[in-house]
Amino acid sequence: MKKILLSLICIPFLTMAQPSEDAAVIKKIADEILRNGKAYEQLYELTKQVGGRLAGSPQSVKAVEWGKRTLEKNGADNVFLQECMVPHWVRGGQDKAEIVIINKKKSNRPLDVLALGNSMGSGGTVTAEVLAVADFEELEKRKEEVKGKIVYYNQGFDPTNVKPFVSYGQTGIYRRSGPSRAAKYGAVGVMIRSLTESTANDPHTGAMAYMDSFPKIPAIAVGPRDADAVWALSKQSSFTLSMTTYGSFLPDAVDHNVIAELKGSEFPNEYITIGGHLDSWDVNEGAHDDGAGVVHTIEVMRALRAIGYQPKHTLRFVLFANEENGLRGGSKYAEVAKEKGEKHLFALESDAGGFTPRGFSIQANKEQMAKLQSWLPLLTPYGTHEITPEGGGADIGPLNRTFGTPVGELFPDPQRYFDLHHARSDVFENVHKRELLLGAVNMAALIYLVDKYGL
Amino acid sequence: MKKILLSLICIPFLTMAQPSEDAAVIKKIADEILRNGKAYEQLYELTKQVGGRLAGSPQSVKAVEWGKRTLEKNGADNVFLQECMVPHWVRGGQDKAEIVIINKKKSNRPLDVLALGNSMGSGGTVTAEVLAVADFEELEKRKEEVKGKIVYYNQGFDPTNVKPFVSYGQTGIYRRSGPSRAAKYGAVGVMIRSLTESTANDPHTGAMAYMDSFPKIPAIAVGPRDADAVWALSKQSSFTLSMTTYGSFLPDAVDHNVIAELKGSEFPNEYITIGGHLDSWDVNEGAHDDGAGVVHTIEVMRALRAIGYQPKHTLRFVLFANEENGLRGGSKYAEVAKEKGEKHLFALESDAGGFTPRGFSIQANKEQMAKLQSWLPLLTPYGTHEITPEGGGADIGPLNRTFGTPVGELFPDPQRYFDLHHARSDVFENVHKRELLLGAVNMAALIYLVDKYGL
């Protein structure tokens, strides 16, 4: 009785899902994935047989081959490659840094560091006094002191942000713009505190970008425990750092988005995109970032096919190229879609790790948000408790900006993500099988509802 | 405007929380714990300096001393010990089992096993043919074949249960009663599949209990990968197993609940209990089970004191003795409370691990549940998305059964819990600092609300 009443009340406002039928289909999807899911085994292949796969690297070519083959084997109607040119940054050697102990050369204290992605090598070793600042505000105040020094930014995550992605949003600018903002005042190198709250000392790389008007000085991230030591030292005395990096750009390389389709029965020319990015940093296996998103994408396709689901719209499963240091794959996908005049109903990305799902973050208008949120009761049994307007994924951003397509991103439990993100520890062993599979369950369920009811 | 309207509607039904004031206090609690929380460092002490602490062991005595000292140091008004007698089971040696390869004695296949807690040693090595059954139903059907054999139960977790605690509820009976149910038909030993879905091969111990009417045969749990091998082998041929265990009971030992109080300003004789259990299994550090619950308990007290909160009711912080193989601590606590005619308003336990909180599971009446659920909007910013009627914790069960006290348990993300539960891998290194602290945040917030508004 209660159910009927609820439906009567809500029908005037929304095209309502049919709770019991939809719950049954979603349960079928979930059971299929939790019993027979292949995502974990596929992630093993991608991380252990392909490995780290930065855009332009030999492994990125292998990853495209693996992606095409794996999509073909798992039920795609068709698979094709979409060519795009990508930047080809290489680390070039083992990044090094150490605190120089004056008069005791042999006891220099080595720091665990990684050059920032896209940064230029130091051209030999750069040795200079360190100016340690808390943030850009302090840098501006002390700009007269910068010349000839290595600037160290100590900006860390705010522990009172319950969601670490908020902290990443607040501090990411130190990695991206910190080097040029220091070079502007004559710095000869930059070191940042790694963007993490991890209790381990792994340094975390990630993309930076130089401003053209200032010298391209070398830039590194230091592990958080070493960062604590550097910061403490800076409060006691002046000290010198020497840093050695080898980064450089080779000519742009050919790369590919890998795209599979399940053809729509009613609206074959209307697309729903599901994706993750195939590239990763060079220092790890890209297991959570974004191997998880890649195998989520493939698993959603496999499971929908396995239960015999016939989509109304054409579902596109896209393994994007070059998210990490260029976003060329995502840009190309939207560019081609525009050229072809494609109609894109919705796009969903997984690029926040393979941890237990907690919800989705969405960029959509009010009516679309209301419709998505009306489906929450169907998703909560699988872990989705919130659908928030916090934004969609990086690779599908261009689709949103080109067409206004509503976009979303899986929001897994975020507490461990920045322990591994862009660090050596982002390896297969740190991914949990059931957590990974549950991500695919929630994504497949949402895609089923969007395909059935539109947005 | 909307807020006011909502308040007007709801006031007739419930004593309403004052959202903005309460939100501010809870934010203060959360900030205190996330910035200055001591739970992680205390867990390091408990796991690394005290170690595994099964009831009756020398470490359990050290744990009581550590608990008393740590509660005293962290702001308790008073700390006292509540004596209780506990069973004193000892493992007695290194449990062993191997598949005996007939005619090739030297290539026997060893299995990774642990004797079940409370089980009796094999008295030398027991070697017998294996009867492998899927479940009790198959055992009953094949009861004529049992005599003289070792029964192996292959019952595992159902992967389609999204919450692994449901699977544990379904399969736990094989560990607890499997040995006697096989002994009834003449089995000479029992081996169970470990109660886990882990991809690792660690065996998982845990309490069993013999029925007095049947022989006390030895009983072991085998790691899940070995279990797969045993089950596959049983489908191909008959085979023999030899098992060696050393378990025995020494005389009951003296143990203690460790109890700290923050005295209530308005209702000093009405109690709210917050607790976890101090004992653990002998094979690990009891980091998640239940070191996490212990340090959650201490952290809630520390944080409420640190922000200067003056409770209305007396808050009791209890580190319970002997949850794992006797529940004597929890029983004693309720027994003494009854003798003294104490009034218990609410009890909250943490005994499901130190992972990111997702909610609370509660045993309470309808009105109490409604009141608790009305507080959800205040808790969701910290991770609590559901307050379900799935029950409270083991140690506070006796309080509920004695007085009808409503009880609750923190419900952290459950996917990794049974990878570690009662296995060697339940060590400090597998606990995540922020996940652990967030558990204390949600517990402290709920206790604040119950103390302020009653239940």
Image (cartoon, coloured by chain):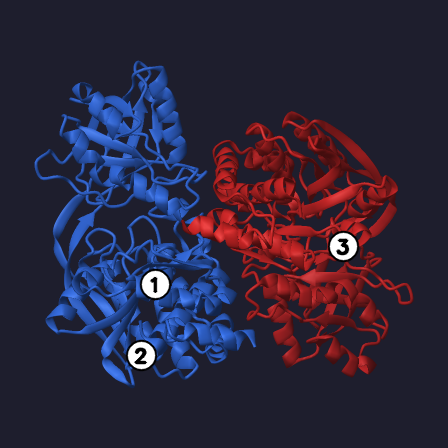
Chain colours: A red, B blue
The foreground one among A311 and A146 is A311
Q: Secondary structure at mark 1?
A: helix
Instruction: Using the numbered discs, state the Cα–Cα distance from disc 2 to disc 1 in whole angstroms.
Output: 30 Å
For marks 2 and 1 on the same chain, the one whose residue lies earlier in the sequence = 2
At which x and y percent is residue A46?
64, 36
Confirm or deny contact between disc 1 and disc 3 (CB under 8 A): no
The foreground one among B172 and A243 is B172
At x 52%, y 48%, the residue is: A379
Label 2 or label 3, whichever lies nearer to me, is 2
Q: Quadrant of residue A151?
A: bottom right
Q: Residues within 10 Å of mark 1 (few under 14, many from 20)?
A: some
Both on one chain, marks 1 and 3?
no
Tell me the subunit letter for badge 2: B
Q: Quadrant of residue B299?
A: bottom left
The amino acid type found where label 1 is placed reads Met
Marking on residue B369 = 1
**Mark 2 = which residue?**
B76
Q: Secondary structure at mark 2?
A: loop
Q: Is residue B377 left or right of residue B83?
A: right
Tell me the subunit letter for badge 3: A
Label 1 or label 3, whichever lies nearer to me, is 1
Q: Residues within 10 Å of mark 3 (few under 14, many from 20)?
A: many
The amino acid type found where label 3 is placed reads Gly
**Mark 3 = which residue?**
A117
